[in-house]
């Protein structure tokens, strides 16, 4: 048996093993994306997200997933980047100071997603805030979609200053799909006005359909101010990535200034619908050789699998030349 055939055999059995070991994740994937994944030898972007969930348990992932720890990491990597001020943290929502939630603040948990309460003029009521936070603190956010990075985050509740986002034709959010090999694309949205525009790796606008804001009248104006913010985000995102193989780096815009938002390691749980052009660029830029799993030594079956996967990548079975028309930055 040739070495190449041996590697293909190892990757075949790895695919079978991942299906048997993770049937729920496999079925979720197939149901949502309408094809059966090959997590043993992932070629497509969505398969690589699934592979990250199952295989690549980088020890920095819990810190990047922790909304409080991520702020500190972001400031260490980019000193000039603003972050929203944290006013209070605790482990028990019952001890949340009532006087802190009488004004305009945001109450969050650090260990999950969609766990934000925007408090304006003392509403919602204190009891409702505590009840929701207590419920969130009991949830393990790694379980619904296998997002391992959330599993070991020490759970905390915190109160953060409320930023006044956007305004006029400015966006409220800028999200950069950043890879160790370059920038995929930039998602720029005004969530107040339900408007969106996307930009390429060079900061130039692109026309790509989006399921969130699909209508022509939902196009965000391509203003010089927005381009300047996108340019800043493109400069900051690789530094914030810190050599990681891939993350979506999220920013907020307040007072015409960028604020760090969060690191997103599993965007849309790995089931987001993308236009063919950005998805092709993303899967080409995402080189798994930069992953923690393929950078560190292994023993036994893990070593055999790592060797086979690395060899397949180096034969250019899984990566291309990165010469897409979506920008080259």
Image (cartoon, grey):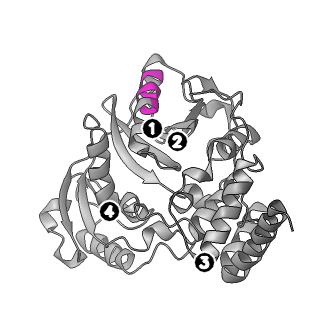
Tell whether label 4 touches label 1 (CB within 8 Å).
Answer: no
Q: Earlier in the sequence, mark 3 or mark 2?
A: 2
Label 2 sits on a secondary structure element that is strand
Q: Residue 160's spot in the image, x, y percent?
A: 24, 54
Which label lies toward us, 2 or 4? 2
Q: Which residue is mark 4?
A: 108
Label 1 sits on a secondary structure element that is helix
Q: Earlier in the sequence, mark 1 or mark 4?
A: 4
Q: Which residue is mark 3?
A: 300
Tell whether label 1 touches label 2 (CB within 8 Å).
Answer: yes
Which label lies toward us, 3 or 1? 3
**Cα–Cα gap, marks 3 and 2:** 33 Å
Residue 172 can be seen in this image = no
**Cα–Cα gap, marks 3 and 1:** 34 Å
Which label lies toward us, 1 or 4? 1
Q: Nearer the viewer, residue 82 or 173?
A: 82
Residue 235 can be seen in this image = yes
Query: Residue placed at 71% from the left, 31% from the top?
Result: 324
Query: Residue placed at 65% from the left, 43% from the top?
Result: 282
Q: Which residue is mark 1?
A: 238
């Amino acid at each position: 048996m040739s070495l190449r055939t041996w590697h293909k055999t190892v990757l075949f059995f790895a695919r079978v093993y991942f299906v048997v070991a993770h049937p729920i994740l496999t079925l979720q994937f197939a149901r949502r994306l309408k094809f059966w994944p090959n997590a043993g030898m992932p070629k497509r972007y969505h398969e690589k997200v699934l592979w990250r969930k199952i295989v690549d348990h980088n020890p920095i992932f819990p810190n990047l997933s922790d909304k409080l720890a991520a702020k500190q990491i972001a400031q260490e990597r980019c000193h000039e980047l603003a972050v929203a001020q944290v006013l209070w943290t605790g482990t028990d929502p019952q001890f949340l100071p009532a006087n802190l939630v009488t004004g305009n603040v945001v109450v969050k948990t650090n260990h999950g997603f969609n766990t934000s309460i925007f408090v304006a003029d003392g509403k919602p009521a204190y009891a409702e805030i505590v009840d929701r936070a207590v419920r969130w603190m009991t949830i393990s956010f790694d379980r619904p979609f296998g997002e391992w990075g959330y599993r070991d985050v020490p759970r905390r509740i915190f109160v953060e200053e409320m930023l006044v986002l956007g305004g006029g034709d400015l966006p409220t959010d800028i999200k950069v799909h950043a890879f160790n090999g370059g920038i995929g694309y930039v998602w720029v949205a005004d969530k107040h006005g339900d408007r969106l525009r996307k930009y390429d790796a060079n900061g130039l606008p692109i026309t790509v359909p989006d399921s969130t804001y699909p209508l022509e009248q939902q196009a965000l104006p391509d203003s010089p101010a927005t381009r300047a913010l996108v340019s800043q985000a493109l400069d900051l995102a690789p530094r914030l990535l810190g050599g990681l193989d891939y993350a979506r780096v999220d920013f907020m815009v307040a007072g015409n200034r960028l604020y760090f938002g969060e690191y997103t390691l599993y965007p849309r749980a790995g089931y987001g619908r993308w236009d063919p052009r950005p998805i092709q660029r993303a899967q080409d830029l995402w080189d798994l050789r930069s992953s923690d799993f393929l950078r560190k030594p292994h023993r036994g079956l893990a070593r055999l699998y790592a060797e086979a996967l690395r060899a397949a990548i180096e034969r250019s079975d899984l990566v291309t030349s990165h010469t897409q028309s979506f920008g080259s930055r």
